Amino acid sequence: MTVRKAWIVAGVAISSALAFVMLLIVGVYIVAGNLANGVGGGAKALAKGAVPAAYSNLVQKWGNLCPAISPALLAAQLYQESGFNPRAQSHAAAQGIAQFIPGTWASHGIDGDKDGDRDVWDPKDAIPSAASYDCELASYVKKVGGNLTENMLAAYNAGAYAVIKYGGVPPYSETRNYVKRITTLSESFAAPVGRVDPSEQAAGAIEYAQKKLGTPYLWGGTGTAEQGGRFDCSGLTQAAYETVGIKLPRVANDQYNAGPHPSRDELLPGDLVFFSDDPTNSRAIRHVGIYVGGGYMIDAPRTGAVIRFDPIDTPDYFGATRVTEDGAKALPTTV
């Protein structure tokens, strides 16, 4: 095939993809407008690779310790506390993957792996201890009316006495925000059990990304004037969603947690699509693009390339996220 013919074929393919994109974008708005309430919550299975493989079995096992928690909720707490970093240490002396302070660890840490010691730095002890502590708090507030999981999380943040005193989640803004953040974030760690609602902001994000086609890639680029309006992959997706009022984290592996995860055959325009050399660990994600339909995404691929359309069906395809405003707001600012 000649170069000229190759360009013609490529142009036809991209034109067809764009036509398909516009139809799907319209569909995003129509479906989003018609859906009153999505299917959510209650899933026991973890989303693909959402928890690093080294800890997924622990989270799955101990996340079913009592009715107040689930593997997805436990995963959300660990991600919120440490970003799954077993060596994390805060300025307040909180330690390990579950960020126990020494006093709490002394009274609530357990020997999860039955090796004869309780090590706050060992996830095989710290993850079971986090689940056990959650369930202990739940037992304190089980007679309080309302949602047991929300009351447990409120007790984690404000103390069981406050939950009992107020007959549920106390009227403290910090506590109410914590409860909402963890319950919302847990949805991005659970494998969807039904339809995942489309985002109304998706079309706006795609429109922004389309205007950047042909812009040279810049590692670390976020589109500032000083950078000549150039982007890297996650800088582009962050900027695209910021134009529709959704603030995403800076890096791709944190953007994965900004909402639920549709399967490959459920993708809609505006979904973020992710790529990794490790299919078992979302923390190893190294690339992200914005799905536009027809098996294509808009992405900023690498140094020396420009923002362009690329196919998503490659061996390193990891999965997708349907960005939600609440999901993005629930993400910790640093992990």
Image (spheres, helix red, strand yellow):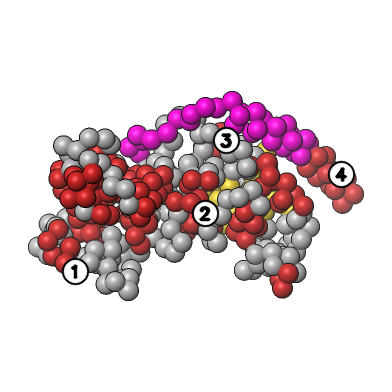
Q: Is residue 24 magenta?
A: yes
Q: Nearer the viewer, mark 3 or mark 4?
A: 3
- Kindly check if marks 1 and 4 are in contact, taking CB atoms under 8 A apart as contact: no
- Kindly check if marks 3 and 2 are in contact, taking CB atoms under 8 A apart as contact: no
**3D distance between C-alphas at marks 2 and 4:** 35 Å
The quadrant holding residue 89 is: bottom left
Nearest to N terminus: mark 3 or mark 4: 4
The residue tagged 4 is 8
The picture places residue 228, in percent across and down from the top left corner, at 75, 69
Residue ID at (50%, 50%): 328
Left or right side of 160 for 2: right
Tell me the quarter of the image containing the C terminus.
Answer: bottom left
What secondary structure is the magenta-colored segment mainly? helix
Q: Nearer the viewer, residue 141 or 251?
A: 141
Nearest to N terminus: mark 2 or mark 1: 1
Q: Is residue 41 visible?
A: yes
**3D distance between C-alphas at marks 3 and 4:** 33 Å
Left or right side of 267 for 70: left
**3D distance between C-alphas at marks 3 and 2:** 17 Å
The residue tagged 3 is 198
Q: Is residue 237 visible?
A: no
The picture places residue 117, in percent across and down from the top left corner, at 12, 64
Query: SS at mark 3?
Result: loop
The residue tagged 1 is 102
Q: Is residue 204 above or below residue 174?
A: above
